[in-house]
Amino acid sequence: MPELPEVETTLRGIQPFIENQTIQKVIVRRPCLRWPIPKTNLQQLIGYRINQLQRRGKYLLLCTDLGTVILHLGMSGRLQVLNKPVKADKHDHIDILFNNNCLLRFTDPRRFGALLWTNNNPQEHPLLKNLGVEPLTRHFNHHYLHTQLKHKKIAIKAALMDQHIVVGVGNIYCTEALFMAGIHPTLPAKNVSSLQLKQLVVAIKNILRRAIKKGGSSIKDFLNSLGKPGYFSQELQVYGRADLPCLQCQSILQMITIAQRSTIYCSRCQPIPA
DNA sequence: CAGAATACCTGCGGGC
DNA sequence: TGCCCGCAGGTATTCT
């Protein structure tokens, strides 16, 4: 489900209900997501307030005076705010109840998501401290990409999805951005021209911004924190369109696998440079 | 060291 | 109807 636009959509959806609210109760139904859930730390949070809700890459941070809850939605995770008690379903692993009677519920069928705890600066947490730049800041530009990629032989698509280079770009938006920039996804990262890198940066920023505006993509089951789908999937040009005609040139779109992820591209619009 | 493969899970749709 | 297969938005860990 969640790449940067979906995580950002989630943040914006839950922020008004939980920021500055005091934690009243925490229920952990399933002790393990990707890693064990730090139950003790969560119980100690009762009576503490969420000072701030932040996003770093695909992580969400619930900041309190005691420490920070680090959340990752994995592949199928979802956060929603309920304003009345609703019976928990099979995959509703964690509930956090606030004094305003809002209930923050974490649901994750595949359990690739995570809830972690840190007493220290969350940016220094092992999972966060080596993350790459935020794609929607000025630090993400073609000079930066050139520096990062100039020695990399891996496919450009694999490099863009490496969260240590740039955060938030996942399989959908990476596939789309490469199409927009006219770059073949298997091209070795070091061989992407300077002009192409510029186009790629523009494409990535553009697609992420547009997706956020539309509330993210609902490919299969993404629902935002209000239980509504995102509407960006209607605008996807290549992702999910293998064997269909390219919307630009009518060539049949191809599907290949790169770094164990499905990749769709147009062999005419995204040629391999001679 | 870089890069590739593996592992973690459940659910869904399609083919038989 | 039911079973088996492949596929799904991610990424730390282990391997070569």
Image (cartoon, coloured by chain):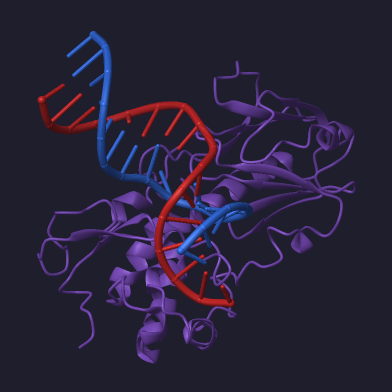
Chain colours: A purple, B red, C blue
Q: Residue B14: x percent and y percent?
A: 17, 33
Q: Residue B16: x percent and y percent?
A: 10, 25
Q: Quadrant of residue A27?
A: top right
- Disc tally is 0
Q: Quadrant of residue A133?
A: bottom right
Q: Nearer the viewer, residue A225 or A100?
A: A225
Q: Please, is residue C3 above or below residue A78 in the view?
A: above
Q: Nearer the viewer, residue A4 or B10?
A: B10
Tell me which residue sits at (22%, 53%) in the image: A241
Tell me which residue sits at (63%, 66%) in the image: A131
Tell me which residue sits at (23%, 85%) in the image: A273
In the picture, which quadrant includes the C terminus of chain A?
Answer: bottom left
Q: Residue A251: x percent and y percent?
A: 10, 65
Q: Quadrant of residue A158?
A: bottom left
Q: Residue A89: x percent and y percent?
A: 55, 19
Q: Nearer the viewer, residue A118 or A249?
A: A118
Q: Horizontal placement of A189 versus C1: left or right?
A: right
Q: Horizontal placement of A190 versus A43: left or right?
A: left
